[in-house]
Image: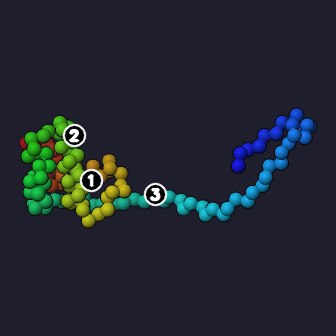
Amino acid sequence: MEDVKITVEQMEAKNVVEPEVVEAEAVEPKAKEVATTVTIKVRAMTRKQIKAMRKAGHDMVFSGQQEGQDNKAMFDMVDWILDNVYGDVQLDDLPYGELVQLALKTYNKAYGSWEEVKN
């Protein structure tokens, strides 16, 4: 219902329309969203997973890409890791930035740091 504003002049002139009072329907309060923390342990990739990632063309070392050179290749690799290493975990509703970090930590756990990999 809109707010009704009545001026003194309208009240004196008795041009005031009485607002109709209507009872509101009972509305259940919305449940408060509770922030939940999901802890996913960084996994080591198996040899089989690494070979499959290479075969799919998503291993940054074998694709000739250097760190930061090709974002698309890196994010393809991230998605591959999330789908294939963490496929048993529901990740779709989690923040993508945190998932990127999880995938990169997984990759680093498989090879060591980027400096170790490229040398």
Q: Quadrant of residue 7?
A: top right
> Residue 42: which numbered mark, if any?
none
Residue count near mark 3 (Cα–Cα under 10 Å), binned few <14, some 14–19, many ≥20 = few
- Taking the image as shown, residue 51 lies to the left or right of residue 101, namely left
Q: 106 or 50, which lies in front?
A: 50
Residue at coordinates 31% horizontally, 58% vertically from top-left? 91
Counting from the top left corner in percent of width and height, residue 70 is at 18, 38
3D distance between C-alphas at marks 3 and 2? 31 Å
Query: Can residue 116 be seen in this snapshot?
Result: no
Judging by the rendered image, the residue that carries numbered circle 1 is 102
> Residue 35: which numbered mark, if any?
3
Q: 75 or 66, which lies in front?
A: 75
- Taking the image as shown, residue 2 lies to the left or right of residue 32, namely right
> Residue 71: which numbered mark, if any?
2
Q: 25 or 34, which lies in front?
A: 25
Question: Looking at the image, is 90 positioned above or below residue 7?
Answer: below
Q: Quadrant of the C terminus?
A: top left
Question: Looking at the image, is 13 positioned above or below residue 85?
Answer: above
Residue at coordinates 63% horizontally, 62% vertically from top-left? 27
Disc 3 or disc 2, which is closer to the eye? 2
Disc 2 or disc 1, which is closer to the eye? 2
Look at the numbered discs 3 and 1 and tell me whether their residues touch, using CB distance below 8 Å: no
First in sequence, mark 2 or 1: give its number. 2
Q: Amino acid at mark 3?
A: Ala
Residue at coordinates 67% horizontally, 62% vertically from top-left? 25
